[in-house]
Amino acid sequence: MFTLKPTLWALLTIGLVTAPSVAFSAETATASLIDTNGKPAGTLQVTEAPKGVLLHIEAKGLTPGWHGIHFHEKGDCAAPKFTSAGAHVHTAKSVVHGLLNDNANDFGDLPNIYAAPDGTASAEIYSTFVSLRGTSSRAALLDADGSSVVIHAQADDYKTQPIGGSGARVACGILKQD
């Protein structure tokens, strides 16, 4: 069995106690999700990371099962259909949807989320396609017309154009800088 000498133990303990803490301060944006009736449907937070963003979602009122979720190009969530949110976030004129599509360049693409039998969904998703301010040529979420996050009625198949067959928009949240 390995044992530490008292002086080494004291040095290690002091080092742990007095070691300077490194604070990481990342820019964030948040949104309150609403459903098609304009009622609260959860919250989300987007945190800037060195090479993308981390999206934390807490949704409610969804039908159980898988749901497509995407970043949309406008910060506008007019119920009931949320079409005012526009198309998915992108930077190119010609946009191809789908995480499993070889020609994809739709920066709004995200993996599906799963709603439990009680209609709640909690998830964290990382995307390298976007940033809050357009860093490193990634699409900007907090640009002049803002952006939103939309949850769809069905799962995204990651291939079908233009939205992966994910169907109607059932929840929407406008991203706002914290």
Image (tube, grey):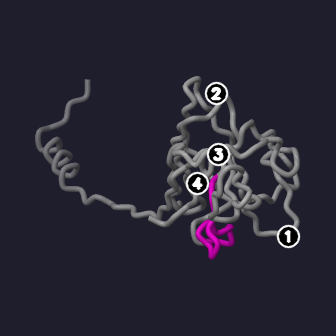
Asked if residue 108 lies left or right of residue 163, the reply is left
> In x, y percent, where is residue 26?
45, 63
Q: What residue sits right under mark 4 in the picture?
A: 173
Give the distance between the C-alpha atoms of the residues marked 1 and 4, in whole angstroms.
Answer: 25 Å
Q: Which mark is residue 93?
A: 1
Q: Nearer the viewer, residue 18 or 9?
A: 18
Mark 2 or 3, nearer chain start: 3
Mark 1 or 3, nearer chain start: 3
Asked if residue 24 lies left or right of residue 142, the reply is left
Give the distance between the C-alpha atoms of the residues marked 4 and 3, in whole angstroms.
Answer: 11 Å
Q: Quadrant of residue 4?
A: top left
Asked if residue 24 lies left or right of residue 123, the reply is left
For the residues labelled 1 and 3, say whether their Cβ atoms are less than 8 Å apart: no
Decide whether residue 96 is among the magenta residues: no
Q: Amino acid at mark 4?
A: Gly
Mark 2 or 4, nearer chain start: 2
> In x, y percent, where is residue 146?
62, 68
Decide whether residue 142 is among the magenta residues: yes
Q: What residue sits right under mark 2 in the picture?
A: 64
Mark 1 or 4, nearer chain start: 1
Residue at (62% x, 73% y) in the render: 143
Q: Quadrant of residue 175?
A: bottom right
Which segment did they paint magenta?
134-149
Q: What residue sits right under mark 3 in the picture?
A: 36
